[in-house]
Amino acid sequence: TMRISMNHTFERRVGIWPAGFDEDGELFCNQRYGDWPMEVEDDRMNPWKEPQWYLLSYGKTASASSFTEKKEPKYAVDENVQTWWRAATAKCGEWIQVDLEKSYTVNAVQINFADDGIDIPVPGKIRGTTQARYIEEKDHVTRWKLEGSLDGKNYFMIEDKSEADTDLPHDLIVRLEGVQARFLKLTVIEVPYGQTACISGLRIFGVGDGEKPEAPEFEAYRENELDMMVKIEGTNATGYNILWGSQPDKLYHSHMVFGNEQRIGALVKGKEYYVRVDAFNENGITEGNGVKILRG
């Protein structure tokens, strides 16, 4: 599970990633781009296959109909599940919009609603003893509509769930053929319990028509027996994937970053590691030039 822990210590989300055993019987789990849209094949698949659609929305300009202090629209495009945009009211029709700054082929949009407390009396019986809780048995709905535009004036419908009978707080809209759009606007119609609209991620994926980032240069060193520091120098990159493992062809651990420096506290005392840094942007992924040895 992925930790959120903003409303409660055990506030989590469940994640599923490709996993298996290599030819030596060693267990691996590929989380390199694990929360990006990926094709799942019916038969045996390559667990290390890279995604075909890339993150377009990180750090782009976001605007909204209204917002609450310290919960501005920018927090819907910062790739941080612990921050979110919150509208100033719970009225129907509050909206948030992302400007991709140029037209892209958009293939998928993930809409992540956030929980920001629930300002209502407990609607039923509290059950349990040491872990007392209320279990909702009533069906609720999450309703919205997603529109696209090339100029920010004329909009077309991408997905209309204004009359949906489902409650999907982490919905994924896929357009295999792609749509051309620069602006994407989400209008919230209804959320459970009539609460204020909160979006932790209006995540947009597709393919740009520019150049991939250059292979980054990096420095990796052990700060102590358990921690390593990685410092990166790159060009034209949105972010980086730091990979490390016990052998050059077994880089089974990964940490995605959007900055140029990251401390990683996941080493084993006395163990030797190999490290590589890949770069990505809206146009693709570039594998790092080489692997560096991190001595035990």
Image (cartoon, grey):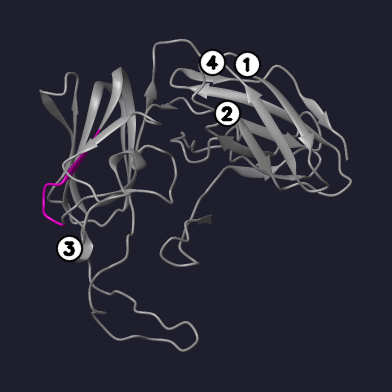
Q: What residue lies at 72% left-to-right and 37% top-to-bottom? A: 229
Label 1: state its secondary structure: loop
Along the polypeptide, which appears first: circle 1 or circle 2? 1
Q: CA distance from mark 3 to mark 4?
A: 44 Å
Give the structural element (helix, strand or loop) at label 4. Answer: loop
Residue 87 percent across, percent down from the top left: 21, 50
Of 37 and 42, nearer the camera is 37
Main structural element of the magenta stretch: helix, strand or loop? loop
User: Relative to 90, is 268 on the left or the right?
Assistant: right
**In the structure shown, which secondary structural element does the residue marked by tag 3 occupy?**
helix
Q: Which residue is the site of mark 2?
A: 240
What type is the residue that disc 2 sits on? Tyr
Q: Position of residue 91 (x, y in %)?
A: 11, 55
Distance from label 4 to label 1 (Cα)? 7 Å
**Is residue 240 at least partly visible in the picture?**
yes
For the point 43% across and 35% down, the residue is 37
Q: Residue at x 45, y 17 (%)?
A: 283
Q: Nearer the viewer, residue 117 or 193?
A: 117
Please state if 185 lies on the left or on the right of 293 as rendered. Answer: left
Q: Residue type at mark 3: give it.
A: Gly
Sequence-wise, which precedes: disc 3 or disc 2?
A: 3
Question: Label 1 near label 4: C-beta < 8 Å?
Answer: yes
Which residue sits furthest front?
Answer: 69
